[in-house]
Amino acid sequence: MGMGRFGFIIHPLSVREDVARKYPIARLLPERAVEWAIKHMRPRVVSHITGVRSATGAETEGWFVGCPLSPRQFLTLPVDFVIGKVIEAGRVAQEAGAKIVGLGAFTSVVGDAGISINDALEIAVTTGNSYTVATAVQGAFQAAELMGHRTGEAVGAVVGATGSIGRVCSQMMAEVLPQLILVGLEERPLRALAEQLSAKTQVSVSLNGTSALRAADIVVTVTSAVDTVINAEDLKPGAVVCDVARPRDVSRQVAEQRQDVLVVEGGVVAVPGDVEFGFDFGFPPKTAYACMSETMILALEGRYEPFSLGRELSLERVREIAALADKHGFRLAGFRSFERAVTDADIDRARTAAAAAARVGS
C-alpha cells in the first residue's frame, strides 16, 4: 500500500489575528473590512504536512487548505455560498493528492455537517467528530482525577447535550458517572435523551445551565453558540470543564477570576513520528486537534471513507477510532487552556484553591 494522503480544511477563528499572520495589514483594518476582503479570496493550500509515522511503521502526508471565512461569516452568509466555499477547499485538497479530507472548526458544522460536501467531492470527507468526542471525555476524566475527583462519585454535566457531539459525550459519561445533568435549550429532546440514559445512571435535565452547573464536578461543553455560555460565577469550586466548542463556550473571565476551577480544551493529541505541520495553529510542536488527528489516523489505516459525517455520531465509531488511535500511537498530550499549556503547577494551584474555597463554603 502506498503512502496515505489527507487534506484538512482550516479557517481563521479570529479574523484579525489569524488573517494578520499572513497579511499584517489586517490588524489595522476594521473586522468587517477584513471579512469583506477574505470573502472574495479563493481557498488555497496553506502548508504541506510531513513526518506522520504510525507505531506500525505506516506513514502519511497531507495538506492544510485554508477556507477564507470567519466564524461569523459561516453562521451569517447564505448556507449555499458557505458550503460552496468549503467544497472548493475540498477540491484544492483533492487536486493536491489527498484521498480523504477533514473538516476543521466551523467547516464541519455548516449546513448538513459535511454530507453535501462529501457528495460533491470525489474523495472521502470526515468531520473528525468521533475522535474529538473520544479525547474530550477521556481528557475530562483524566483532568478530574488530577483535581482529586473520583469518577465513581462525581456529578457530570453536558452542556449542549442533545447536539451530535453532546449526545455521544452524554452516553459515554453515563457509563462511568453515578449522576449526570443534561443541559440544553429544548426540554423535549433533553427528556428523550435522559430516558435513554436512565438505565445506566441517575439523570436530570436543565434548561438553565447557570444553576445546573453549580452542582457539577465534571462539565463537558459542546454547544455551537457564537458567544460564551459559561461564566465565572456558574461553576462549583474544584470543577473541571472540558470545552470542546469552537468558538469557546467558556468565557476567558473564568480563567482570570476562578483559580479554583480547571478549564481544559478537548482533544489535544500527540501525533506519532516527527511531524512538521508547516503552519502555526497555536499548538506545541507535534501536537494537533483531535479532528485533525482523526483524518491522519484514517489515512494511516487506509480507510478512505466518510467516517464521521452528519449530525448523528455513533458510540461504536467513537470507540473504533479510539482503538485505531491507540494502534497507531496517537495519545492525549496533556491539556491546554486559553492558548497555553496547562502545567502540573497550574493543576496543583487549582486543587489548592478549590480545597480552600470548599473550607470557606462549609
Image: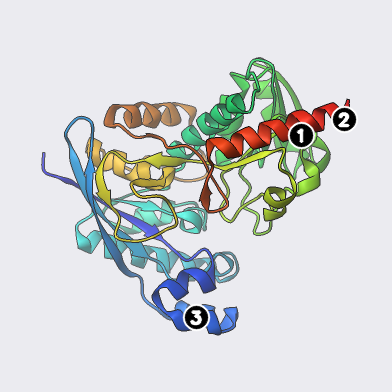
Q: Is residue 276 left or right of residue 261?
A: left
Viewer-proximal residue among 182 and 336: 336
Circle nearer the viewer, 3 or 1: 1
First in sequence: mark 2 or mark 1?
A: 1
Residue 241 percent location from the top left of the image: 64, 38
Check the image and report above or below for 42 versus 250: below
Dot 1 alpha-carbon crowd within 10 angstroms: few under 14, some 14 to 19, many 20 or more: many
Q: Is residue 124 visible?
A: yes
Q: Which residue is mark 3?
A: 26
Q: Name the residue that disc number 2 marks.
A: 361
| Residue at x 42%, y 56% (from the top left corner) | 116
Answer left or right for 210 relative to 66: right
Q: Which is more N-terminal, label 1 or label 3?
A: 3
Identify the mark nearer the N-term, 2 or 3: 3
Looking at the rendered structure, the kind of residue marked 3 is Ala
- Rendering coords of residue 7 (x, y %): 29, 55
SS for callout 1? loop
Q: CA distance from mark 3 to mark 1?
A: 40 Å
Q: Residue at x 58, y 52 (%)?
A: 338
Q: Which residue is mark 1?
A: 237
Q: At which x and y percent is residue 106? A: 51, 58
- Residues under numbered marks 2 and 1 in contact, where contact means CB atoms less than 8 Å apart: yes
Q: Is residue 263 above or below residue 105?
A: above
